Image (spheres, rainbow, N blue to C red):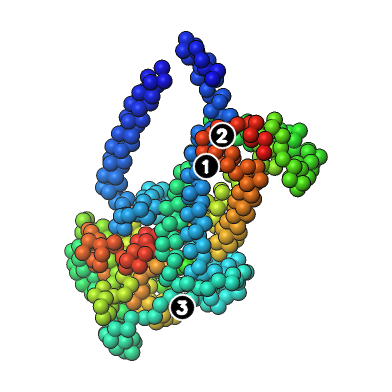
Amino acid sequence: MSKALSRRKLITTGLATAAGASGLAVAARLADRYGLIPPDHGGIYGIGETLTYASQRILIPQQSLAREFNRSDISKVCPINGPPPENETYQRLLAGGFADWRLSIDGLVARPRSFSLAELKRFPSRTHITHQACEEGWSFIAEWTGVPLSYVLNLAGVLPRAKYVFFFPFPEKGFPFGKKWGSLDMSDAWHPQTLLAYGMNGQELPTPHGAPVRVRVPRQLGFKSMKYLSRITLTDTTKNIGKGWGSSSPEHGFSWYGGI
Amino acid sequence: MATVGSAYLPGIASRVSDIRDSSRHSAAVRITHWINTLSFFGLLVSGFAILLAHPRFYWGEAGGIGTPSLLDLPLPFMKGGPSGWGRNLHFLCAWVCLFNGSLYVLSGILTRHFQNNLLPAKSDLAWRSIGREISNHLRFKRPGVDTSLAYNLLQRLTYLLVVFVLFPLMIWTGFAMSPAIVSVFPALVTVLGGQQSARTIHFFVADFLVLFLVVHIAMVCLAGFKHRVRAMITGQVTAAKDGA
């Protein structure tokens, strides 16, 4: 009897394992089709990153808005992480008040083009007072002013194939894409609060906060809000850019999406 | 064994062996206990690694260098260092903890484990019996053979606190630190007083869990480490030897 029991157990366990494995394979294919697999899904840590990314994309409505605050909540101190690019072009543009600076947008768009700072400021603007937390643990509340990224994306005409919006600062020696670069998926890119910010707390965007223009993604931790922008590129893949993990942060041991 | 000759009465045979198997810990409790041990250890180590990036705590929505702090830990600021793998390991283990914890709670409800083994009887909740239980513990008075198979009152209350208060608080305060999650449920963070308050509470509740772990291991050692650990691995317990 114990033999029969163990055989039955063996068969049920085998069937359950097979069902589980094929279920996982189907789930993986479906997840990939619906854009639920982050570019840094590899390795043991990729499991946690994928679960977080997929569940947030499934459970969090695309239009849900980050909390906004009152003027009186604005932090008196807004700390920063890391210095501005040491690149000569950037230093020259900075010295010239960014009069000659241009932001280009290319890749999977119908009308690749570039904008001056004055042009960006003439577009419809949006201002929000939002909380920004660094993955390290500290945070501040600031008022940000800029043109919604969605407005600029619409001007360029995003092709349906596009899945990622890459943000590059100025290249530096040994860093063809700049030291800190990254990408958003289309969900974060089209989000109404996502700005190309040129103003902070009623002033021009201060240099250490990413002058002349940075992206601000209030539904994300600070590291997703790329600074010192010079180029935006739309792609359908993260391959061939750096190690192909979607941003420079996974190359330093951090994650692409984070989410918490 | 009591199952001899019971091939003709399979119902009885399996019932007898069930009793033997469930003498101390059910398989569900044992498996989820050890998976939780692993994930908690991972969460602890990685939580400390994340903490090293900014070993300072605040109250309210925002806080950072240059703003008044609630607590400064005597630890170095290790920027760009261990918080990378720390965060990756933390969220991997958090998922394991969440899945495993859900399975544990679900099976605990379905098998009436909480009701039968953890919820104290009403009569036990009288102050006198709580007092007696505490004084027994303080005098390191060991339980007799008859009581060693069931949880005593302090164990019951402590486990209930850990399972239904401290762990849920860790998950809640963790979620409250996610800007994406609180965009859908702002109350998760506002009722705590803000994002930095959530981080601070996360840290203090973690400290209570570590305190629980220390006492838990100390009690296992006092009660007989080998027997208790064997009971949690195999589910078997030999009551006579376990008199410890």
Asked if A126 appears above or below B129 in the picture, the reply is below
The residue pinned by badge 2 equals B25
How far across and down, in percent of the image, does residue B44 sit? 52, 57
Q: Residues at badges 2 and 1 in contact (C-beta under 8 Å)?
A: yes
Q: Callout 2: few (<14), some (14-19), or many (20+) C-alpha neighbours within 10 Å? A: some
Quadrant of image for the C terminus of chain A: bottom left
**Disc number placed over residue A202 in the picture, else none:** 3
User: In front: B101, or B34?
Assistant: B34
Q: In the rendering, which numbered label is found on residue B33?
A: 1
Residue B213, percent from left and from top: 60, 51
Q: Residue at x 63, y 42 (%)?
A: B224
The one nearer the camera, A191 or B56, is B56
Q: Earlier in the sequence, mark 2 or mark 1?
A: 2
Q: Residue at x 40, y 68 (%)?
A: A223
Question: Residue B155: which quarter of the image?
Answer: top right
Q: Eyeballing the image, is B50 above or below B156?
A: below
